[in-house]
Amino acid sequence: MKAAIIMGSTSDLAKVEPAVSILKEYGVEVSVRCLSAHRAHAGLSEFIEECNSNGTEVIITAAGMAAALPGVVASKTVLPVIGVPLSGSVLDGMDALMSIVQMPSGIPVATVAINGSKNAAYLALQIMANKHNELRDSLLEDRKKMEEAAMKTNEEIASKYQ
């Protein structure tokens, strides 16, 4: 199982590290790169071609402001691309969200919440779980644990206020 994470700037690293951790917890090999769509387009194209041929199953992209990176990546591959809009500008990530979510027909980018790298990782895992049964089983088991924890909390609250 293999995924790639591309961020547009080193200032984005702290916001994508949670995704790296989650993917690695599930045994996914993760390649992480800092390749701006505007300033490193040749290197970005080269890395996408590498992903297209090395068994990478999904690419997570994280970018702020104009957030061209997810769309550029999606235009160069048919691998699933997940965009993570990042905050940091005057518009607090809304500019990046609108940029990523408004892709033209035929070049989709799955988009998660602003600074939502954790959910990007879980979405990547769900995509890969269609091919890897052990990953699917792990995700289902973790969902069961989440439900049990939520129900326990509910019972504690209910008993406190009866």
Image: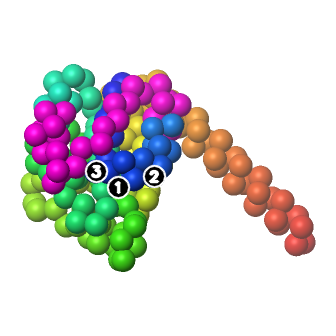
Q: Which residue matches tag 2?
A: 15
Front residue (pair 124, 61) = 61
Are dots 2 and 1 in contact, CB under 8 Å? yes
Q: Residues within 10 Å of mark 1 (few under 14, many from 20)?
A: many
Badge 3 density bin: few <14, some 14–19, many ≥20, Cα 10 Å: many
Q: Amino acid at mark 1?
A: Val
Quadrant of res 154 = bottom right
Instruction: Say which element carries label 2.
Output: helix
Q: Which residues are magenta?
A: 22-47
Residue 66 found in image quarter? bottom left
Of the residues under marks 2 and 1, which one precedes in the sequence?
2
Q: Nearer the viewer, mark 2 or mark 1?
A: 2
Does 30 appear in magenta? yes
Provide the residue designation for mark 3: 8
Q: Are marks 3 and 1 in contact (CB under 8 Å)?
A: no
In the picture of the structure, the residue carrying the numbered disc 1 is 84
| Mark 1: secondary structure | strand
Q: Amino acid at mark 2?
A: Lys
Q: Earlier in the sequence, mark 3 or mark 1?
A: 3
